[in-house]
Amino acid sequence: MEFKDFGLAEPITKALASKNYVTPTPIQQKAIPVLLDGRDLCGIAQTGTGKTAAFALPSLDFFARHPKPTPIKGCRMLVLAPTRELAAQIAQSFRDYGRFLRLSVETVFGGVPIGKQIRALQAGVDIVVATPGRLLDLIDQRAMTLKDVEIFVLDEADQMMDMGFIQPLKRIAKMLPQGRQNLFFSATMPKEIEALAAQFLNDPVKVSVAPQATTAERIRQQATFVNQAEKQALLTITVKDEAINRALIFTRTKHGADRVVRFLEGAGIPAAAIHGNKSQGQRTTALQAFRDGRVKLLVATDIAARGIDVSGVSHVINFELPNVAEQYVHRIGRTARAGAEGIAISFVADDERPYLKAIERTTRVKLDIVPLPDNFMEAVRNLPKAAPKKEQTPQQQARRADGQRRYQDGQKRGTPDRAHRPDAEGGEKRPFRRRRSGSVGAHKGAVQRTGAPR
Ligand code: AMP
């Protein structure tokens, strides 16, 4: 089967040809005909399976055949994604596949000024790709309406649930008009995701390209048992020894991600980190450097890495195992994309052994246990120090300065206050009375009344 067999509108087949796409992936083969028929769809598919094109192509075909003016402050298609990176990536796919169509595509997500998004929406757009939080902000500010949505896509539904987006999604579901086409994608389909799907879908066709939580077969999966404190030494050896083209290294925490980068840098190995504490600009820069191949190692937390599509990731290294088995499936799905082979290496500390068991149970795959390398003890002994902490970002500096200023203000205000207490001078020092919680507003008022320096 080839793309031309779908009978997609000519501008779309032209765009596909320019990207050298000839054969649809399995999810595309199953989903595209159903969607061209206008049916709702429930798809079980991981990132890397080609699911973005599976929903983008038939939607673009619909718009090519049914042109309409864009609805004021509204959109004809809404795609919801859990992270900014994934939203940006999906929007780019729409722009690529729709480059010979005159359609507008906008992204709506936090971390960037809202004003620009409000202006972009004023006259309406064809396709909006959004994260739930910012979308609701815009709706609450009456800068956007969902009443004109003709096609709705919920992508990576299981990740949305993990990130606590359930209430925002329920709110959004209520605002969508009747009679629209709905698409729902998730890598896994436990009961609660099925219940969520039921809120959006109307007699859907179900398609699945990998049985639930089955790990991609092309990925070689290994695990090494190692003390938590010695993982850094093992990582240093691993990234030097393995023929790494691009590696994504996962840590459980943001702090952990920064630490790993500093240790790698201390050993003279360039690496970048992306996680929620980084500004949007830093995240984009790090991701771009990784995409361009300027940085071979990207250290990420699960949330930040969600849906990231970078081709040619040869290795996924789990510096720490995730405590949710499905997360492991998501992580290793970042390698072995589009037909390539991939290697997933997990560092397992003693207290992570139960997680390993759970992963093996869920994926029904036994990981190859690889012993510590011969030069491991030497690497532990000679592990270079971590590079010093980087300068803080302007935002972090501002936040810190603000905290210090407030603390100093508190001290200043405290002094006259204490001086007026009859027993303040000469007497025994009474502990400074703690402000009652919830009195921040009153406190601010006090500052204004007394005119104390801010
Ligand atoms: P996705 O699962 O949507 O994130 O897509 C994974 C990757 O495969 C993306 O880089 C796509 O550009 C690429 N891709 C999607 N469909 C095809 C196709 N039919 N042929 C070749 N590459 C594709």
Image (cartoon, rainbow, N blue to C red):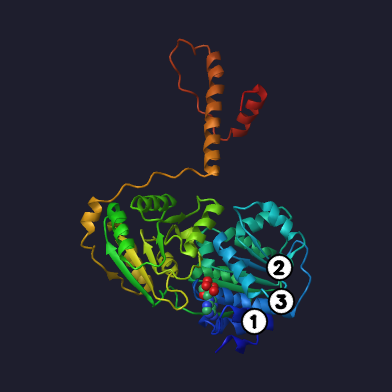
How far from the left and from the top, in percent, is residue 350? 27, 58
How far from the left and from the top, in percent, is residue 435? 53, 29
Residue, disc 2: 104
Task: Residue 422: give its label.
Answer: none
Q: Is mark 2 on a helix, strand or loop?
A: loop
Q: Does the residue labelled 1 lie within 8 Å of ligand 1?
A: no
Q: Determine the CA span between mark 3 and mark 1.
A: 16 Å
Residue, disc 3: 63
Residue 170 in view of the camera: yes
How far from the left and from the top, in percent, is residue 4? 61, 87
Q: In the picture provided, is 148 more to the left or to the right than 352?
A: right
Q: Residue at x 55, y 31 (%)?
A: 405
Residue, disc 1: 14
- Name the amino acid, label 2: Ser
Q: In the picture provided, is 352 more to the left or to the right than 179?
A: left
Tell which of 108 and 92 is nearer to you.
Answer: 92
> In the picture shown, does residue 100 fall above or below 173?
below
Q: In the picture provided, is 448 more to the left or to the right than 420?
A: right
Q: Residues within 10 Å of mark 3 (few under 14, many from 20)?
A: many
Q: What element carries label 1?
A: helix
Residue 203 in view of the camera: no
Q: In the picture provided, is 2 more to the left or to the right than 335?
A: right
The N terminus lies in quadrant? bottom right
Q: Which residue is drawn at 57% across and 66% down?
A: 89
Tell which of 361 and 31 is nearer to you.
Answer: 31
Nearest to viewer (mark 3 / mark 1): 1
- Name the amino acid, label 3: Phe
